[in-house]
Amino acid sequence: MIDVVFASNFFEHLLTKRGLLRTLAEVRRVLRPGGRLLILQPNIRDAGGAYWDFFDHHLPLTERSLVEALELAGLKPIEVRRRFLSFTSKSDPPSAPVLRLALSQDPDHPTNLGPTILDHRRAALGGD
């Protein structure tokens, strides 16, 4: 059993919802009770058509659909942020360090179209 699983920009590359649910089931299996799954994930709601600019993006996910999938897999949401970072690491960051810091801390900034971050804890046996 492990304490933490971190998934960054991964789930959108899975081919099907069934594949996502199988992946989440495996995460749940290896997490100890109380273990955490941290997810950094593009949000199609905010990225819109740009989501499909990457040939290997197959599975459209929003913060809501991902929460639903996690709950189906027996994982309990702790924190969900709809927007967290820029949509892609290929775009140029702001040049001023203060602006970079401000954007990284303001999930509602209008140019912040990026991934959803979710923190989930494996439910303890017995449904908690």
Image: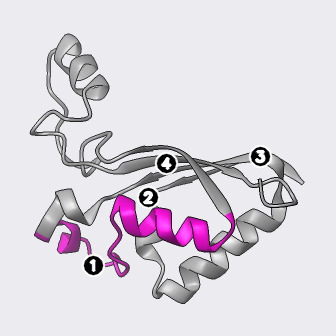
Helix, strand or loop status at disc 4: strand
Tag nearer the camera, 1 or 3 = 3
Residue depicted at 79% across the width and 60% down the height: 127
Tag nearer the camera, 2 or 3 = 3
Distance (Cα) linking label 2 and label 1: 14 Å
Residue depicted at 21% across the width and 63% down the height: 45
Dot label at residue 35: 3
Residue segment shown in magenta: 49-74
Question: Who comes first in sequence, dot 2 or dot 3?
Answer: 2
**Residue 3: in sight, yes or no?**
no
Dot label at residue 36: none
Helix, strand or loop status at disc 2: loop
Q: Position of residue 51 (x, y in %)?
A: 22, 67
Amino acid type at mark 2? Asn
Question: Who comes first in sequence, dot 1 or dot 3?
Answer: 3
Distance (Cα) linking label 4 and label 1: 24 Å
Q: Position of residue 80 (x, y in %)?
A: 44, 45
Image-based side of 116 in relation to 22, left or right: left
Dot label at residue 55: 1
- The answer to whether 75 is drawn above or below residue 26 in the figure is above
Q: Quadrant of residue 101?
A: top left
Tag nearer the camera, 2 or 1 = 2
Tag nearer the camera, 4 or 1 = 4
Label 2 crowd bin: few (<14), some (14–19), many (20+), radius 10 Å = some
**70 or 127: nearer the eye?**
127
Q: Which residue position holds label 2? A: 9
Tag nearer the camera, 4 or 2 = 4
Helix, strand or loop status at disc 1: loop
